[in-house]
Image: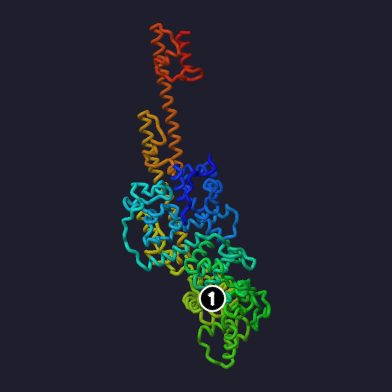
Amino acid sequence: MEGYFRIRPKIAEHESLTSYLYRLAKCNETTYRAIIQKVKTQNFVMSTNYKYLDNDPYGLIDIHLLSKLTQMSSNELFSHTLHPIVLGTTSHSDPKELKKIVDRFAVYYYDNQKRKYCSHCLELNNIYKLIWQIKSIEICPIHRCKLNCSCSECGAKQPYLGKHLQDFKCFSCKYPLTINDDVGVLDEIYLHKMSELYHIWESLLSIITPITSAQFNLTIEQTVCLKMLFLSQSNREKYNVSNNKIFHPRIIHFLKEFIGNEGMREKSYLGSVIRFFTNSGISIKQFRDTKISREYFESFVSFHEKKYPGNCETPWCEFRNCSKKMCRIIANRKQYNGAHYCSGCFIKYGYHKKTEKWKEIGKKTALVKKIISDIYEQKNIETLKENEIIGYIHAYNLLPSSTINFQEICVPETEDLLQKFKVLLALGLRSTSDLYKEATKLFGWSMQEFVCYLNQKVVQQLLFNAPKILRGANKWSDLHLLLSRYLKDCHEQNKMCSKKEFMAQYDISKHTMLLSGINNSIEKEIELFKERTRKEKTAKLKELAQQFVTLKAIEKKPLHTIDVLEKLGVSVKWSRKNCPDLYYWVLKEVEKSREEIRQLVSESNKERLKETIEYMKGKQMAITKVQLREMLGLKINALDRGTELCNYYNELLLDMKVL
């Protein structure tokens, strides 16, 4: 093999690696496949995998050997793939890891299935650009036209790899791809927007060095995430979660986890980087030159430090001025971080998001003091909220029972009380007023009884810790009744049930379907329907197969597995996967049929052999195996020693006393 290609065309700016290899093959009067055979790294790689060369050629071809053959540096060849984006935004150096990241990233942003092109660019430059394959790129800003992927003559989509990369003709009808019959005028606003996107991607694909240097002992990825948060908040001096103008809260949460080493999903990370540059309008040069201040970094770190609960500050709580009885609240108010409740007094506390101070959530302590004052002043207490506070005062013995007229109320047993509140929560009730209204209907409780039971410690623990599915599962009490009616209709019509159909028919949301467990019920019913249908189909197929096997047995014809399955209209693969019992039954019947045919042939050969020997004896002819084979048309080894027919032949000769 020569040390390099005789003709080595220069790789064009923004040209894809596969496009260049096709041009190289054409100039050297060889084929793309022949070049791949020279530089491939494995003995066998599926040809379809070579369409991923533009992602990252590592593992598919020897890039250093290709570099030697083309007299170009490896970095220059890599720069015409998606490799630069990953190399410029991550700190990975292992080629295997880089390839994995590129391949995951390419699934969402790069089109390896069809080849896109600009007819005018093909005519002028005879190259296919890498940027054209980005899924969001739809135009060529140079010629202000849409990119094509189909032949303007026959409409065939151009595959990613093929001879059309050499001759620029449709792979199907050979019509020139350089001719574009579409002369439509694009909207100026759309053209401007797509041109901006095109230039952003052009700069991303041209990255040579990392887009940032590491700061504050973070990795490059973590620094990129921190810098994106910094720039998306308009370079503020301190971190503030509410000032982000680019990212969705879910992405902000991911970036914060990434900086804290809690999540390392490269696809989400690279997706966030692409989203930042395409939405912010900030260039890579601006991004690289931006420096994050120490003050901003420290504010970010302090904002996301794990906040431990503070002390209980309730005056009458036995655990006042300590935090050992603080329990975490999962669902809390938006203006508080790290919400907890004290299991001694059941007052809620948390860190206020603006002041970052530990304080009571709500004003329950102040209300208790106010209601005690109102009781001593003999003011009328009428509202449910005020009565709820009186129930709290009674539960914690802050006033004598006689003072608040609660002496006649008898609290039920714990299990009974908890069961009744579980019933109320299962109806999807959350607020105190809704709980009270339903409790009055179901259990006939008065307001005093309700507030007294509500403030019992076991009930408060249930309310704070009840899972969401218990608090809001059944939005409609007859939801399962509707489901049973729907499933009955489907069964009568012998059709498969569908979640979408059920939701549309009864106007039910996805959220309700999930919480109520209806999703699981319908999925189970679908599985049962499929199993029932499979069994019915198997039974019918087996009946048909038995008829076909019986017919072949009557006709005394050999039976073949393929013939049986073709008669049933199913493939071997389908029958093995869906009806294994039927498939193995057919195999057994075929084997039985072969044995029967073998027996019939054997008996027929014996009969003919006997008649022939008798004929030859009568004509006083020499009886030899060779002559018998010729007269009977037997196989060459049919009368070999040890075969059944040979043993019968010897028996006949002894019986006829020929030997």
Position in image of residue 182 (x %, y %): 32, 58
Outermost residue toward the front? 6
Residue 303 shows in this picture? no
Q: Splitting the image into 4 quarters, where does residue 140 fall?
A: bottom left
What residue does disc 1 label? 334
Q: Splitting the image into 4 quarters, where does residue 539 fall?
A: top left
Q: Which residue is at a point 45% across and 51% down the rendered structure image? A: 19
- Amino acid type at image mark 1: Lys
Compared with 309, 622 (above or below) is above
Q: Residues within 10 Å of mark 1 (few under 14, many from 20)?
A: few
Q: Secondary structure at mark 1?
A: loop
Task: Looking at the picture, tell me which residue is in the foreground, 286 or 247.
Answer: 286
Number of residue marks: 1
Compared with 87, 169 (above or below) is above
Position in image of residue 180 (x %, y %): 33, 55
Residue 197 placement, left or right of 387: left
Residue 356 shows in this picture? yes
Position in image of residue 465 (x %, y %): 57, 71
Residue 586 placement, left or right of 212: left
